[in-house]
Image: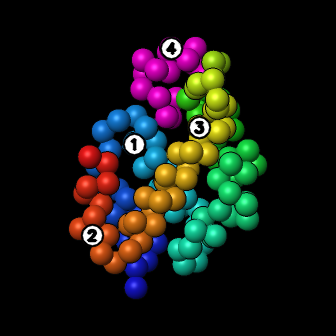
Amino acid sequence: MTTNYDISARILATKATSAWSKAVKTYALELMDELEGDFTQVKLLNGAENWRAYSYGGCALIYDEDIAERVCSPSEFKRSNLGANPPNKDESWLDCQARALSQASRLAAKCARPEAVHLVASIYR
């Protein structure tokens, strides 16, 4: 049986080179740190209906500046006026975080599968 510790170790072993992939990895590790009991997607959501509700409900970062700093490269962060400007015309920073959280949950799910030991190296190439 795969433990939450094993899943976190596999997440740590994933290669993350871009600011976005590093943010997804960080969110995945935070989700695993907060998880009580066995891994399931429902438990990861911690009572929220979806990742947007999780993000807007204050279960992750709540300030635009903090979200932007996590998901952006230094130049993108500066270009966003330290998070004062939205990430794009269709999203708020909380929406952007919800998208990252969704990807983080998929990363954790991949790492939870027993065969994931061989898969995690290729997730973010």
Left/right of residue 21 with respect to residue 38 in the rendered view = left
Identify the mark at residue 117; answer none if there is no mark: 2
Q: Distance between the residues labelled 2 and 3?
A: 29 Å
Left/right of residue 58 with respect to residue 112 in the rendered view = right
**Which element is circle 1 on?**
helix
Residue bearing the label numbered 1: 21
Q: Amino acid type of disc 3? A: Cys
Q: How far apart are marks 2 and 1 (CA)?
A: 19 Å
Q: Where is residue 73 in the image (x, y as percent from the top left)?
A: 42, 26
Q: Are marks 2 and 1 in contact (CB under 8 Å)?
A: no
**Residue at horizontal 65%, vertical 62%?**
45
N-terminal label among 1 and 4:
1
Q: Residue 98, relative to residue 39: is it above or below? A: above
Q: Distance between the residues labelled 1 and 3?
A: 13 Å
- Label 4: few (<14), some or many (≥20) within 10 Å? some
N-terminal label among 2 and 3:
3
* Residue 8 within the magenta-colored segment of the rendering: no
* Residue 78 within the magenta-colored segment of the rendering: yes
**Which element is circle 3 on?**
helix
